Amino acid sequence: MRVPLSWLKEYVDITLPVDELAEKLTLAGLEVANIEYIGVAPPASERARRHMEDGQIETGNNRILWERDKIFVGQILESRKHPNADRLLLATVDYGAGEPMTIITGAPNLKPGDSGQKVAFATLGAVLVDPYADNFKTMKLKPSKIRGIRSEGMACSERELGISDEHEGIMILPEDAPVGMPLADYLGDVVFDIDVTPNMIRIASIIGVAREVAAITGAALHIPMPTWETQPPAAGEYCEVEIVDDDLCYRFTATIIRDVKVGPSPFWMQHRLKLVGQRPINNLVDVTNYVMFEWGKPLHAFDYDKLLARARAIGKDKVKIIVRRAHEGEHFTTLDGQERILDPDILMICDEAGPVGVGGVMGGLETEVSEDTRNVLLESASFNFINIRQTSRKLKLPSEAAYRFSRGVPSELDPIGNVRGAQLMAELGGGNIADGIVEDYPRPQPTVEVPVDAGEVRRVLGLDLSQQEIIAILRRLEFDTRTEGETIWATVPWYRLDVNITADLLEEIARIYGYDRIPLTMLSDELPPQRHNWPLELEERLRDILAACGLQETINYSLTTVENHVRLYPDAPEQAPGADQFITLANPMSLDRVVMRRSMVVSALENLQRNLRHVERLATFEIGLVYLPELGDGELPAEIRRFTLAMTGPRRPAGWLGGDPEPMDFFDMKGVVEVMLEQLNAGPAVYEPADVHWCGPRCARVLVAGEELGIFGEVHPRVRQAFDLPHQPVVVADFATDVLLPFFRQHPRLQPISDYPPVKEDIAVVVDEAIPAATVEALIRQTGGRLLVDVHLFDLYRGKSIPAGKKSLAFSLTFQAPDKTLSDKDTARLRRKIVARLERELGASLREA
């Protein structure tokens, strides 16, 4: 919100320096993001902060310093044609010095014979904005000779003064502008750019900021309530109002302004609108914008004669405004010329012939005011802020009105806005106002009373304030108060929709007292004991391990689509979860973020789909949640923590040290899983073949201590194709986090390091094809006992000398004793024992050389 101090001073006395006022506002929650100096120099403290030298031009935000001895308010005494140029004029200007100066100008808004106009006049040496430069650039005014006549001054346009981009003619000042006054004293200003948080929409107006300045600084506030002069007949003879859907529109007021003349707004209004960033259009439209920035009340002006013509076209003699939901598929053309297709969630302002405006967002093209408008119906209404926010987003129609309505505008402001707007239209358009306001007010704004006491202030804020001090702070904020014993009951002002509970009052007390004044308080109790957060610590450990394995963490959206889940079931899509098994958003931001995910595999594949357009290799992991309504408590879904790994692309990217172009596959993922389990002391794991809907050629189920950790394997080719992934192996793992928690919590068992050398031997056995290598390894470990310290599978062979249906598994065995050097006889005995057990339980046989 841009706040010119010259406008603000109309409603509150400001005596503080600019930088001090900005600091106080910021500390009270009204963050001044930028201070813009228009034609005037920053204070000394600000110049020092910006390292500006005396006399240096302030060029931030395309602004310049209007030097008081070089740029003045001038008056044109005479204008005549240039004797040697058809399109140039000679203008004699009085600027308060001894002798008037004759200058040369080609301004199209100045004609031969014109006199009396007040202008911004610059003399030699003045620094101005170069109006013909593509980017912001300053120039110093020098004497010039044009077609034989010397000119030593300039009547300036708004662009040359750095006010706006307007350069079609010179800037004409009001008739009462004092000749000879430095322009910096007449038009110079300071504009605060204040960041408005959603809960402080009340400050999206000059008067709203004035109230805050008065409360924060203790300055006098003087906000006159708008008044008007009306004439019969009554407004009710011109129109009537009916609210059909009062859950979306709480109040609708209308006034009638007759016999107005459309034209440009006066200079003071145009100048103020430009300062707040609004482009002036004409006196009627400018009034609606002016009231919006002054009071925070968006208005809309309808051409009443167009409304009446629509009514008469269907046999009615009177305009009737109807506020209702749109019909399904109803069409409407907004002021921007776009045809909109509506639905029943959109609130419409209608007459009996159909829609004339989107409630709280934008008016309609058919009933807009134009240069031919003579009679105006002025609307001031209040709406359901959530509905306005949804409508604005749905129709992609952001506007200053929707910005305010979508955060809440009080119903009590409706008649104030109507009176202020109607009176300004009558004054600036030469019209008259029909008696009274036509309105429908089915849901009056309630009066809110909130309790607070000194004990609660002390408990929450740490401030030892008396009851009277609290009351004084609240009254500075225009809260009415009454007391019942120790309790203060504060009646919330009608313009404060953000205060409803005691915590809101405490925030107000802290803001006005000053956050910077709240004392530091040392903790008076003992520090609580530090306890492990095991689930969080496990996740952090997983991140460390997987990152060390070369994987990169991703944080994916928890929102996805039902269709992407169905893509995981290429052979049986009917087995995929239905739409009723998801948590569905009522108001999704986009069509691909509609439901909460049930599987993190979906998120992993979506991430690969987006990123493999830019890179050829990815190795990622994500730790997150899946949302399962059927496991919840009936109201909320169960949130299950899981983690996924995804790998695809060349094993090692090509580089100056070489590379490995072979794609990562099932065994690369298995290696990462083994390292992860080893680092978490969760081994040994058992890997079993699995048949999972999204897996393809190879898929394994991982069991840890008999409990399933999850699945990993290569993604099914049809799933890969459904997600538009490259034609290369994609390996994904989907694991449960809580299965690893017991292993992570237990202390690792450390074994003493033996002082004696190990003995290494190899053994190759032939077993049935169906027997997993893990089964053989487990039996070897059990039989070898404590002297067998390591077993490692190093070869799998099928082929010559191996019978059909059989395979050869070769293991490396490491024997080591803690108290002696093992002899050949010791290891031979253990070896015979292992072979005998394998033969007995698995039907294995030693492979012959």
Image (spheres, rainbow, N blue to C red):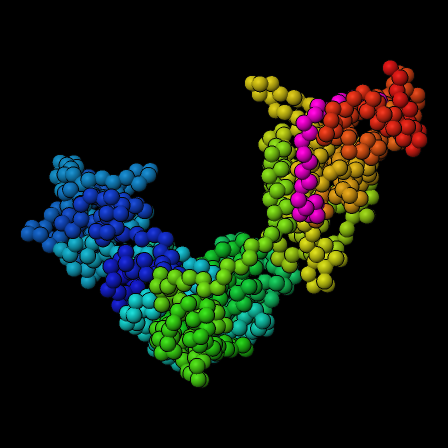
Quadrant in the picture for residue 648 = top right
Q: Quadrant of the N terminus?
A: bottom left
Q: Is residue 711 above or below residue 659?
A: below
Residue drawn 25% across the image and 62% down it: 16
Vertical placement of residue 671 versus 542, above or below: above
In-image side of 368 versus 780 (left or right): left
Q: Nearer the viewer, residue 580 or 476?
A: 476
What percent of the width, then of the height, locates residue 338?
54, 53
Instruction: Tell me if residue 313 can be seen.
Output: no
Task: Name the residue at the left extreme.
Answer: 98
Q: Most extreme residue toward the front, as rendered?
A: 819
Relative height, residue 450 to residue 837 (above, below): below
| Residue at figure coordinates x 60%, y 44% from the top left | 540
**Residue at screen point 38% across, 78% down:** 467
Residue 21 lies, in percent from the top left, at 29, 60
Q: Could you say which quadrant of the image residue 520 lies in?
A: bottom left
Q: Nearer the viewer, residue 27 or 455?
A: 455
Which span is picked out in magenta?
A: 740-764
- Residue 655 lies in quadrant: top right
Q: In this orientation, which residue lies closer to the viewer: 177 or 471?
A: 471
Q: Position of residue 579 (x, y in %)?
A: 74, 54
